[in-house]
């Protein structure tokens, strides 16, 4: 196995430490690193979904403790996203289709980071309206999440803010729960395919690196890095990864 793959372990550790010290998850950064290191389209979702589960679990715990999680904001989306994330994860995609969807997802994540969340007056939404909108949208986001190995929070969070169903912290809390549940469902779908798990020996070390890095960054908050700087770096990484994927489609 190529030696350069082992450099991912300290990179994942460092990424987790830096992002958690700034109060960020950095899940999309792990996905972009896997792309840049040339992981296969069949193994990328397994690694990224596993890292998502660890990253957002810590954040979700903090959001719950602070009282920011509102189940009514996320429940309509979760009902359909869970089975559709499993369905998406269980499908065998061709490399070109997967690459196109992944490039789209990474570019969407980059664009999401470019826009600052703005606080606006929230509107009261009826239960019927929230379910009429949330059920079909949750199915679409969940399906895409399972297909390419993202959690789907990059799509849900701006939607909640745009619709004025949640403030920034409530949207982040809802997105964390959404990512966690979709990642678990999508990961089960991926494993259900029974495909060979390339570089499986790196799975546990990378998860441990992410966990230890996130704990270190959270504990040593005095060494905080600028969240804005990290977001800009992530935007650059995501766009580079997207371009690399798209260029590979024409090789």
Image (cartoon, helix red, strand yellow):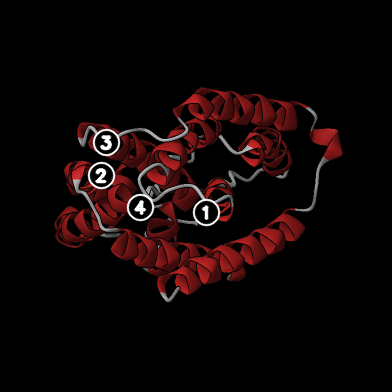
Circle 2 residue: 89
Q: Residue at x 72, y 55 (%)?
A: 230
Q: CA distance from mark 3 to mark 2?
A: 12 Å
Circle 3 residue: 195
Residue 36 vs 223, above or below: the answer is below
Closer to us: 57 or 127? 57
Q: CA distance from mark 4 to mark 1?
A: 12 Å
Q: Earlier in the sequence, mark 4 or mark 1?
A: 1
Q: Are marks 4 and 1 in contact (CB under 8 Å)?
A: no
Q: Residue at x 72, y 45 (%)?
A: 22
Quarter of the image for residue 83 reads: top left
Looking at the rendering, in which quadrant would you find the N terminus? top right
Looking at the rendering, in which quadrant would you find the C terminus? bottom left
The numbered dot on residue 20 is: none
Residue 241 vs 226, above or below: the answer is below
Circle 4 residue: 148
Disc 3 crowd, CA 10 A, few/some/many (<14, 14-19, 20+): few
Q: Earlier in the sequence, mark 4 or mark 3?
A: 4
Q: Nearer the viewer, mark 4 or mark 3?
A: 3
Q: Earlier in the sequence, mark 1 or mark 3?
A: 1
Circle 1 residue: 35
Q: Earlier in the sequence, mark 3 or mark 2?
A: 2
Q: CA distance from mark 4 to mark 2?
A: 8 Å
Report if residue 70 is visible in the image: no
Q: CA distance from mark 2 to mark 1?
A: 18 Å
Q: Which secondary structure, mark 1?
A: helix
Q: Which secondary structure, mark 3?
A: loop
Measured as percent of width and height from the top left, residue 176 is found at 45, 42
């Amino acid at each position: 196995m190529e030696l350069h793959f082992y450099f991912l372990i300290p990179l994942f550790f460092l990424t987790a430490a830096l992002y958690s010290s700034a109060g960020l998850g950095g899940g999309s950064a792990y996905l972009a690193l896997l792309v840049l290191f040339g992981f296969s389209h069949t193994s990328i979702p397994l690694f990224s979904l596993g890292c998502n589960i660890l990253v957002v679990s810590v954040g979700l715990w903090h959001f719950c403790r602070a009282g920011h999680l509102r189940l009514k904001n996320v429940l309509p989306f979760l009902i359909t996203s869970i089975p559709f994330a499993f369905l998406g994860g269980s499908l065998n995609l061709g490399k070109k289709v997967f690459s196109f969807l992944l490039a789209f997802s990474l570019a969407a994540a980059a664009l999401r980071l470019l826009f600052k969340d703005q606080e606006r007056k929230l509107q009261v939404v009826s239960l019927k309206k929230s379910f009429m909108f949330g059920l079909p949208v949750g199915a679409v986001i969940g399906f895409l999440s399972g297909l390419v190995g993202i959690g789907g929070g990059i799509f849900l969070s701006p939607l909640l803010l745009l619709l004025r169903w949640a403030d920034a912290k409530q949207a982040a809390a809802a997105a964390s729960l959404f990512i966690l549940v979709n990642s678990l469902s999508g990961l089960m779908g991926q494993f259900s395919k029974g495909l060979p798990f390339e570089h499986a020996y790196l799975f546990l070390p990378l998860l441990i690196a992410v966990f230890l890095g996130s704990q270190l960054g959270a504990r040593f908050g005095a060494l905080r890095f600028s969240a804005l700087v990290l977001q800009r770096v992530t935007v650059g990484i995501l766009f580079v990864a997207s371009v690399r994927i798209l260029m590979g489609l024409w090789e």
